[in-house]
Amino acid sequence: MKRAIIIVIDSMGVGAMDDAPEYKDTLECNTLCNVAKCCGGLNIPNLQKMGLGNILDIQGVPAVLHPLASYGKMLELSKGKDTTTGHWELAGLVLDEPFRTWPEGFPKELIDKFIEKTGCRGILGNYPASGTQIIEDLGEEHKKSAFPIVYTSADSVFQIACDVDIIPLETLYNWCEIARELLNEGYNTSRVIARPFKTTKNGFERISKDRRDYSLEPFKPTVLNEISEQNGRVLGIGKIEDIFVKSGITHAIHTGKNKEGLEILLSAIKNEFEYDKYLITEKKEYDKELIFLNLVDTDMLFGHRNDAIGYGSAIEEIDTYLDKYLDNMTKDDLLIITADHGCDPTVEGTDHTREHVPLLIYSKVSQGKKLGLIKGFTFVADKVRSWVSR
């Protein structure tokens, strides 16, 4: 059956969009190029063969004469620079109105409702912050009071951090669900994020595998809905299930680290993945498929933490899987590699950056060609739709 595969390397932007200053970003932001420069060049031979270095000048990744994939970069039409906005547009949904952000923290009436509904008795924080820094700053007070740490960022997010030895994980998730319900009442906030952490001998450590995102449900159908409603299987790997609130997804699996997601995708491409274990809709026979993978480590572990070296290593790890993917693909498979926004670890701040994103499109039945600058991440949805409908 026809199968399309989307890999989102979270936050791997390729240069500021013209309106970046409107989002308080410098025009110098360029996540991929600046990371490569800090690393003294990247060792990514498979991405190089596919044509990543043909998109722009990346240290250690020269252009090739005959790239395996079609290559270009995309400009975001939606207003925003966050995960939900980027992924929704990749799936065909453009936001005319940006999600609301909270640079002064959340209003008192919202926090009061949250405290009342959860019974948590109080909160700590309620200001924009780096997730690792606010846990460092308020972690000990949290352990004494058992009050959740609530914070936001430059994105439209309501984040709740708790030590799992103080507040059980199930309670944290329940509090996030309550926050999501409250924010649905006119606050136009993209995501509530559960940020569990634990105390170790080295300090506070976030538990990536137990993070959960509680997004707004897409307000219109996406290409995921189209495929699933037309006898198609849609497998979400990583936080895809959360971003789309299961809408249009037939199978889903959360991941803790990039390597786990990369291994799962390899097993799916090789037709070795046990789909029935991760079914979230009614079981049936399928005649087409979309596999949608988010690789979050680049953003969560390294972009937001201003760790360019770690970011570069994460890209290099991803690259080591690509030859295996290409070797196991058939003439019925389409592979798309892209990103959802930027998060340049070399510029001031720890927030996402408003950037173009790279685009590589590979199949065994077509030659690579230059795509240039494409207006709209929706190009990906259009490509997927036409491929699986052949």
Image: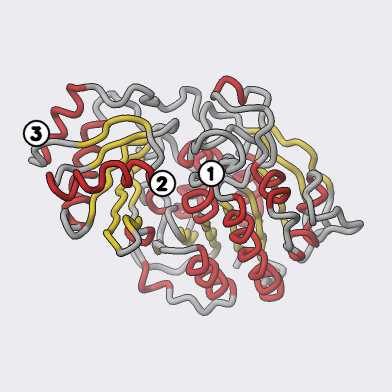
Q: Nearer the viewer, residue 275 or 233?
A: 275
- What count of labels does the image hold? 3
| Lower sequence index among marks 2 and 3 | 3
Q: Quadrant of residue 341?
A: top right
Residue under numbered circle 1? 91
Say which residue label 2 marks: 244
Q: Which quarter of the rendered picture does the C terminus lie within? A: bottom right
Q: Which of these two is toward me, 3 or 348?
A: 348
Residue 56, given in percent of the width and then of the height, sits at 79, 44
Q: Earlier in the sequence, mark 1 or mark 3?
A: 1
Residue drawn at 60 percent across, 63 percent down:
3
Per the image, the residue denoted by label 3 is 116
Residue at horizontal 26 percent and vertical 34 percent from the top: 125
Cα–Cα span, label 1 and label 3: 37 Å
**Distance between mark 2 and mark 3 Cα atoms:** 28 Å
**Residue at the image point whose x is 54% and y is 45% from the top:** 306
Quarter of the image for residue 236 reads bottom left
Residue 241 location in percent, x, y?
Answer: 40, 53
